[in-house]
Amino acid sequence: MKTAMNDSNEVLVDCQNVWKIFGARAPAAVKAVSERGLSKKQVLKDFDCVVGVSDASLQVRRGEIFCIMGLSGSGKSTLIRLLNRLIEPSLGKITVKGREIAKLNAAELRDMRARNIGMVFQSVALLPYRTVLENAAFGLEVRGVARDERNKTARAALEKVGLADWTARYPSELSGGMQQRVGLARALAADPEIILMDEPFSALDPLIRRQLQDEFRQLTKSLGKSAVFITHDLEEAIRIGDRIAIMKDGVIVQVGTAEEIVTKPADDYVSDFVAGISRIHLVKAHSVMRPLAEFKSAQPHCDVDALLRTSPEADIGELIDLTMQSDRDAVAVVENGAVVGVVTTRGLLRGVAGTTAGEPVAA
Ligand SMILES: Nc1ncnc2c1ncn2[C@@H]1O[C@H](COP(=O)(O)OP(=O)(O)OP(=O)(O)O)[C@@H](O)[C@H]1O
């Protein structure tokens, strides 16, 4: 099951108060922003400059899949390009594995991109006159890895993405989904610790897309990689991400797990996004339970020890199944052997309907 827990809390990418302002008068706009805190709208009006990213801070931890989600033009691509210094920030600081990337020289930057932070774009840009194997090995070739070694590594990466039988084919013989897999294999062959993905699956049809989402998540986890994954589709972010940052007009408006975002949207913008999302597998017992003391004072005659039991991480689907198996209207939530709360039928309905957790519930 997907959890918010990570293999470690080590921060691999740390982005602090980063701005990116585009335009001929960007330096003056940056000065005005840092001195007077101008808004995106004011910057456009006063300086004719576009704020791509506005005061963004985020941390990507080891082993984590971090999704950046937002509508077109919200700044996702600009932000991800800042993370491996394809573009330079106007203000703010970005470190990768503790090193400030703005301070790296050209050779150090190349090395960092190869070892630490590789990228897969929406259009993979496969080389048409090269085989699948040569395409997957391309990153290694650029790094000067000898042919035998790079082919061996690329072959292993193609195997991981299910293309072992296609190594001698050319990109034009592959479907869009398979071409994306080659792009992923190319990134995996280079073996970076962090993979940056800019809407890699958005051109694919829904079935293939869901399949690749699941495969990508499994593969990333089994290889112990970290990833930053851009999407404009909240369902994709929820399916793939351990945590999600939601962007609007260059600003990160909320960062959290899917459950946090769905149960506690930071503002109306996020609420609108989460309105259509099914909560059955997202909302967990800990969000809809009534704390034990509160439940006991409301229902002093209920024998809590006689209720069916579950963990705080049980989702609403599981809670519904348990409630149906029982002749009681409630399920006890147990942590470390002790009952910590009770989920009532009403709490369950509230979870499905999306009412904020923590409201008083008539049990
Ligand atoms: N090179 C550039 N010059 C000027 N403005 C730019 C440049 N790149 C991006 N922008 C502006 O920055 C803002 C954010 O764009 P960005 O491409 O990061 O958004 P996005 O969320 O990735 O959108 P999409 O989902 O459509 O790719 C937009 O207003 C865009 O016009």
Image: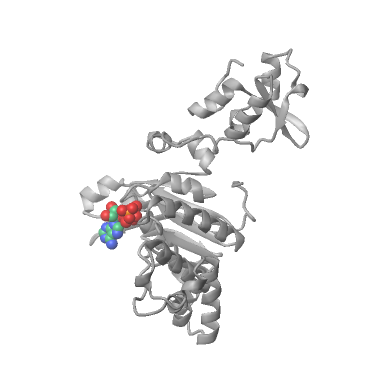
Q: Where is residue 66 shown, x and y percent of the image?
A: 50, 53
Taking the spot 41% from the left edge, 76% from the top edge, the residue there is 169
Residue at the spot x=49%, y=45% of the render? Answer: 238
x%, y% of residue 177? Answer: 41, 61
Going by the picture, which residue comes out furthest to the top?
301
In the displayed structure, 231 sits above or below 226; it is: above
Looking at this view, is 19 or 165 the one in front?
165
- In this rendering, the count of numbered labels is 0
**Quadrant holding ligand 1?**
bottom left
Q: Position of residue 266 (x, y in %)?
A: 45, 36
- Colouring scheme applied when the structure was drawn: one colour
Q: Splitting the image into 4 quarters, where does residue 77 fall?
A: bottom left
Question: Quick one: 206 or 117, which is closer to the camera?
Answer: 206
Q: Say above or below: 98 vs 152.
A: above
Q: Position of residue 131 (x, y in %)?
A: 41, 78
Residue 30 seen = no
Screen quadrant of the C terminus: top right
Residue at x 40%, y 57% (from the top left corner): 201
> Is 228 placed above or below 262 here?
below
Res 9 → quadrant: bottom right
The residue at the point 53 percent across, 38 percent down is 260
In this rendering, does residue 133 appear at all? yes
